[in-house]
Image (cartoon, rainbow, N blue to C red):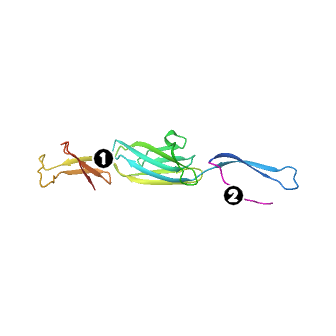
Amino acid sequence: MIYLQFDVEAPLPGIYTLTVEAFNDLTSEPVSASMSVQVGDKIRNVHMAIQGDIVNKHTVVHVTLVGLGPFYIIIQYGDGYTDTLNSTDPIAMVTSVDIQSNEQNDIHDIRLKHVYKTGGEFNITVMVSNNVNSLVIWELFSPITTMTLTSRSPWIIRSPGIAVVKATIQGGKDLNYVWNFSDNFEDTSVTR
């Protein structure tokens, strides 16, 4: 018995019938064998960004992935809710094609809305899988639950450009602040 292995260039992902014929000088006609094969490609890159972070408001989980289908995505929001979709869902369709490499890389841009009903820390996990590989990414997320402003009195005394008002925020991380005194003049942004 002879075992031979050959490396051949695979076509684009899909389901194919692979037929191999063998013959030599003594055979009048070749012998052949066929089998169904599925050609797949790796999921190359997965990225997640979270937009919006207030309890009881829409939070958008933005997933970008590079690779060819078919694949499926499972998003666990960390609060008991899960979304599952696959590459044929309209929300996961190809948005562009990366042609900078020798291989075709479809870019999928997926945006899912979710509402967090309570505050706390939530581990958002995204798993993308196909028949070749799986990639998992996660991010710890903490939505803002409340915000209160306090001052010693409603009168704020200006002292060389400083106003003393205390903002207390529960939840959230990497916060930016915009202070607006409703004077239609300008907003003051503070990043901490």
* Type of secondary structure dominating the magenta stretch: loop
> Does the CB distance between marks 2 and 1 fall below 8 Å?
no
Residue beneath disc 1: 145
> Magenta residues?
1-12
- Which x, y percent locates residue 165? 18, 51
Q: Position of residue 75 (x, y in %)?
A: 47, 47
Residue 99 numbered mark, or none? none
- Vertical placement of 6 versus 113: above or below? below
| Camera-side residue of 134 and 183 | 183
Disc nearer the start of the sequence (2/1): 2
Q: Quadrant of residue 6?
A: bottom right
| 2 lies left or right of 109 | right
Judge from the rendering whether residue 47 lies leftward or rightward of residue 146; answer left or right: right
Disc 2 target residue = 7
Q: Residue at x 31, y 48 (%)?
A: 144
Residue positioned most to the front: 100
